[in-house]
Image (cartoon, rainbow, N blue to C red):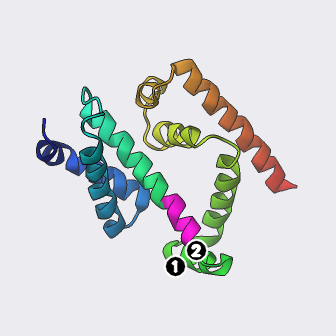
Amino acid sequence: MDIEELYQRYGPMVMRRCRQMLKEENEALDATQDVFVQLLKRRDSLKMTHPSSLLYRIATNQCLNRIRDRQRRAATPGDEFLERVAVLDDTEPRLEARSVLDRLFGRHQESTRTMAVLHFQDGMTLEEVAAEVGMSVSGVRKRLRGLRASLDEVVKEEGE
């Protein structure tokens, strides 16, 4: 299958994923294009046995990178706060949730965040997540269990 065929067939799926994660149409469009640019750059080294899974994973990683870049680009803490206020409806609870998530994921590998997004947000089974990230089901289960334990610690710290 060539890149144009992949784009025609899987482009809408990639775009939905990017919209879901980024919440902004223009950024989702850019991220979708970047997914296919990555595919073009690496087409000789990628296994195309399951293109939908590959594209979904590339899209997820591309969006996570963009979200991290957004946070890094904030010129000052005040600017980042204003950006959050501008894009959120129910600001205070979301800021608190964001703070908890930042502390939570700061304690774990980046791949654990990907697993959590795939399982908890996207509703993939542990088996599907394991296949997506190239780990065993027990490995994914162990990482997510550790994440839950860390969440309990972070929530406990919040209450103190």
In the picture, the quarter occupied by the N terminus is top left
Reading the image, the residue beneath label 2 is 74
Which of the labelled discs sits on residue 105, or is there none? Answer: none
- Considering depth in this image, is 146 or 39 the residue closer to the camera? 39
Q: In the picture shown, does residue 41 fall above or below 129? A: below
Q: In the picture shown, does residue 34 fall above or below 73? A: above
Which region of the structure is painted magenta?
Answer: 67-74
Give x and y (percent) for residue 41.
28, 47
Which of the labelled discs sits on residue 86, or is there none? Answer: 1
What secondary structure is found at the residue carrying circle 2?
loop
Relative placement, left or right, of 2 versus 67 is: left
Q: Residue at x 50, y 60 (%)?
A: 67
In the picture, the quarter occupied by the C terminus is bottom right
- Dividing the picture into quadrants, the one containing residue 92 is bottom right
Relative placement, left or right, of 47 versus 63 is: left
Type of amino acid under label 2:
Ala
Residue 49 forms part of the magenta stretch: no
Type of amino acid under label 1:
Ala
Residue 71 forms part of the magenta stretch: yes
Determine the CA span between mark 1 and mark 2. 14 Å
Q: Residue at x 68, y 60 (%)?
A: 99
